[in-house]
Image (cartoon, grey):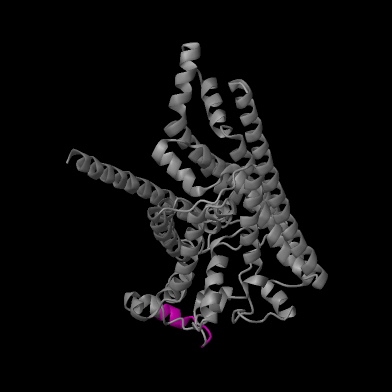
């Protein structure tokens, strides 16, 4: 057989193996989708109340597909911007935020929004700062780590586990930490008159929440201008236009002039010999549309995040409930429900709290008395993960990301090195602390809040950007230090 014939046969065999592998991955993708469909159908046949959990499941599935398709990660956005000057992801995040704000403004004006604004103060900025450093160390934000887990990235799974364990431990932390609590926090927490089963006067986080955070003003841009959030003027002019569109446009202009403009205009001048204002506009638009997949992901995320609010609120009206805790009680699952008969049920995309509930539930099963704190015992509960709506959302997000990765031949199990594993756990721990201090992560404390016109969202976001900058600078120093040591060793 000639060399050419051998090459052709080898190529054909290689292509056949590739096609077989792709076909196998498609079957796996279909299998994951069918699995979630069977869960929805089977549980609904058992009780119509399960449709409420299935809404969380399928929106989570969609979020996972969108995140994986657009490689959508807040950590990547700021790391790429500060480390290599690539603004693609930062632009995609702003696109998604603006679109989410537009959909949310309509839903809010109809009175069907499930969103509740958070207290605004410097704590949100500090929490974002800690979270931002953590996500750079970990190599992914909270939502990014979930979708990367769906791609088979085991380092991302370590990040999720680290976030979850840290939150569960941090929320129930007491003992020596009480010495770090200012007297004003302690007195204010005790004065709240919380139920006896909740030790508001014991534990750093409880006194931080009840004695400080709850005392801060809850502000949206609409209320700052004396408008109601539910009014058309408040929803569209206050929260969307002033609270989202203007700041987002300003940030995009800063990104354009800081990172995109020079390279684009250099190419235009080379082609035409000069540049005009029209070229500036073309450069700005080119930055916005630089990556088709990211832009599409941002578009879909913005739309579906808003739709989840509408659908969830519609089901609450249908079943006559305000919280999923009532549904779980009707289904006979009353274990782990908070003293207020509630479980964590945001009604929109959220990431970190349900992961903390997983670990809190496990700790409780092993004998930990962790229902006496505000986080689990008073607000969120620790229901069985099998019937926790937000848990369904996160697990389905991983599944949706896996499906998209399998369909695009991007799924691959990746075992982390020891160094990556250590950074993943350190970064995850910092993100867990930042999430609890800020009452949310890059999704719940930034993306969702900003899109709803919540002033605390921008504070968390600015802190997150600052933390990411610090994290990038630290890694630059760390890399240079390691290289210097290696070169010194070579010289020896």
Residue 227 at what x, y percent from top left? 61, 56
Left-right relation of 460 to 286: left
Residue drawn at x 61%, y 60% as measured from the top left: 394
Query: Is 358 one of the magenta-colored residues?
Result: no
On screen, residue 181 above or below 8: below
Query: Is residue 108 at all visible to an observer of this figure?
Result: no
Query: Is residue 459 at all visible to an observer of this figure?
Result: yes
Task: Name the one closer to the observer, 33 or 297.
Answer: 33
Residue drawn at x 48%, y 19% as measured from the top left: 267
Residue 115 at what x, y percent from top left? 62, 61
Residue drawn at x 53%, y 42% as measured from the top left: 248
| Residue at the far bottom in the pictured view | 196
Task: Name the one closer to the observer, 166 or 323.
Answer: 166
Residue 288 at what x, y percent from top left? 56, 34
Quarter of the image with the C terminus in it: top left
Quarter of the image with the N terminus in it: top right
Left-right relation of 179 to 135: left
Task: Name the one closer to the observer, 351 or 42.
Answer: 42
Task: Name the one closer to the observer, 252 or 157.
Answer: 157
Query: How many numbered marks are there?
Result: 0
On screen, residue 151 above or below 370: above
Magenta-highlighted residues: 187-196
Query: Is 190 one of the magenta-colored residues?
Result: yes
| Residue at the far right in the pictured view | 45
| Residue at the far top in the pictured view | 273
Left-right relation of 292 to 439: right
Left-right relation of 128 to 352: left
Q: Say which quarter of the image contains residue 333.
A: bottom right
Residue 423 at what x, y percent from top left? 39, 55
């Amino acid at each position: 057989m000639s060399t050419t014939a051998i090459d052709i046969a080898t190529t054909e065999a290689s292509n056949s193996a590739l096609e077989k592998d792709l076909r196998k991955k498609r079957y796996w993708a279909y299998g994951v989708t069918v699995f979630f469909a069977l869960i929805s159908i089977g549980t609904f046949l058992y009780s119509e109340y399960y449709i409420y959990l299935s809404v969380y499941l399928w929106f989570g599935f969609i979020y996972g597909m969108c995140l994986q398709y657009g490689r959508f990660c807040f950590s990547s956005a700021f790391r790429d911007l500060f480390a290599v000057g690539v603004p693609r992801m930062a632009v995609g995040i702003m696109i998604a935020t603006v679109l989410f704000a537009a959909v949310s403004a309509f839903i809010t004006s109809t009175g069907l929004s499930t969103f509740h604004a958070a207290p605004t103060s410097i704590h949100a900025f500090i929490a974002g700062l800690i979270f931002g450093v953590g996500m750079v160390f970990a190599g992914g934000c909270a939502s990014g780590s979930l979708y990367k887990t769906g791609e088979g990235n085991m380092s991302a799974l370590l990040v999720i586990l680290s976030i979850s364990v840290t939150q569960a431990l941090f929320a129930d932390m007491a003992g020596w930490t009480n010495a770090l609590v200012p007297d004003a926090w302690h007195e204010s927490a005790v004065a709240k008159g919380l139920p006896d089963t909740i030790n508001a006067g014991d534990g750093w986080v409880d006194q931080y929440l009840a004695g400080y955070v709850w005392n801060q003003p809850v502000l949206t841009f609409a209320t700052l201008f004396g408008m109601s959030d539910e009014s058309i003027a408040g929803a569209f002019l206050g929260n969307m236009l002033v609270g989202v569109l203007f700041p987002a446009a300003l940030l995009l202009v800063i990104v354009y002039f800081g990172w995109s403009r020079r390279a684009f205009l250099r190419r235009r001048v080379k082609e035409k010999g000069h540049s005009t204002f029209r070229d500036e506009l073309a450069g700005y638009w080119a930055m916005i549309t630089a990556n088709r997949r990211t832009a599409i992901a941002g578009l879909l995320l913005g739309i579906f995040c808003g739709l989840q609010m509408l659908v969830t609120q519609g089901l609450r009206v249908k079943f006559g409930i305000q919280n999923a805790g009532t549904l779980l009680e009707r289904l006979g699952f009353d274990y782990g429900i908070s003293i207020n008969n509630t479980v964590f049920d945001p009604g929109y995309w959220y990431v970190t709290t349900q992961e903390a509930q997983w670990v809190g539930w496990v700790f409780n099963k092993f004998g930990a008395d962790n229902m006496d704190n505000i986080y689990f015992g008073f607000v969120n509960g620790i229901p069985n993960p099998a019937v926790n709506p937000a848990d369904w959302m996160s697990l389905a997000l991983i599944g949706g990301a896996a499906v998209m990765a399998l369909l695009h031949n991007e799924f691959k199990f990746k075992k982390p090195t020891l160094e990556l594993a250590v950074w993943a756990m350190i970064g995850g721990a910092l993100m867990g602390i930042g999430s609890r201090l800020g009452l949310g992560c890059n999704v719940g404390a930034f993306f969702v809040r900003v899109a709803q016109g919540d002033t605390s969202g921008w504070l968390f976001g600015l802190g997150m950007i600052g933390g990411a900058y610090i994290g990038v600078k630290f890694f630059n120093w760390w890399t240079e230090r390691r290289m210097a040591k290696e070169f010194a060793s070579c010289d020896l």
